[in-house]
Image: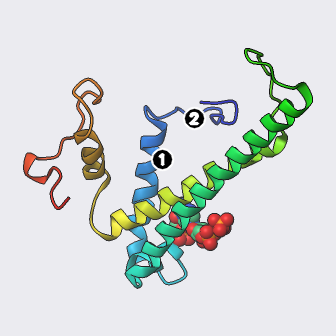
Amino acid sequence: MTLKTYLPENEEPPSSQIGATFEALAATIAARRDAGDESYTHRLLVGSPDGVLKKVMEESGEVALAAKDVESWATSSLAATLAVAGADEGDVLSVELPPEYATAVDHLRYEAADVVYHLLVVLERYGIDLDEFAAELNARMTEGERPRGAVRLREEHIKRGK
Ligand SMILES: N=c1c2ncn([C@@H]3O[C@H](COP(=O)(O)OP(=O)(O)OP(=O)(O)O)[C@@H](O)[C@H]3O)c2ncn1[C@@H]1O[C@H](COP(=O)(O)O)[C@@H](O)[C@H]1O
């Protein structure tokens, strides 16, 4: 939880916010296989594969651009502070970030959600369910990092086709 988020009153939070969100979204996406063409998700699932694959690339690029935007608001604020204060080695500078910085961070989060949604559509399209995807990430963790009871990839599927 951050200051930007809240929980609705009278609702029990799930044990994992992001897990519950991914599961709900993945289930919605899977159900759209049977929807009509009015559903954007349906079109990405059953249309030309280039449609969703291009979107993943495009949205990933937008994440990178959004992050660059955050960077440039930070560096221009630092430059402005230095210009006013001058800089002696060892000085502790207090940089005031403009409102545009916070807006850029919100935009980065928005673009990141676009990538994740389109990635989940790709996983659904090619038959990789969320548990299997979790197992891929779990396989990369050390024993100490892996959550208790985490689903595992069978040995013969680890790094296959890499
Ligand atoms: N989470 C999403 C979701 N995220 C992004 N998108 C769509 O992805 C597209 C992104 O394309 P663009 O980048 O061109 O649009 P943009 O994000 O407005 O603009 P920029 O990124 O260029 O700034 C838009 O059409 C969004 O509506 C999504 N479409 C659907 N969902 C979920 O999928 C469910 C099913 O949706 P249908 O597709 O309507 O069945 C929805 O109820 C949502 O829960």
Q: In which quarter of the image is ligand 1?
A: bottom right
59 shown above or below 23:
below
Q: Quadrant of the N terminus?
A: top right
Q: What residue does disc 2 label? A: 11
Residue 30 is situated, as x and y percent measured from the top left of the image, at 38, 66
Q: In which quarter of the image is residue 28?
A: bottom left
Q: How crowded is mark 2: few (under 14 residues within 10 Å), some or many (20 or more)?
A: few
Residue 85 is situated, as x and y percent measured from the top left of the image, at 89, 25
Residue 132 is situated, as x and y percent measured from the top left of the image, at 25, 51
Tag 1: amino acid:
Thr
Which is closer to the viewer, label 2 or label 1? 1
Q: Going by the image, does 153 lie left or right of 136?
A: left
Q: Going by the image, does 147 lie left or right of 82?
A: left
Q: How crowded is mark 1: few (under 14 residues within 10 Å), some or many (20 or more)?
A: few
- For label 2, the SS is loop
Tag 2: amino acid:
Glu
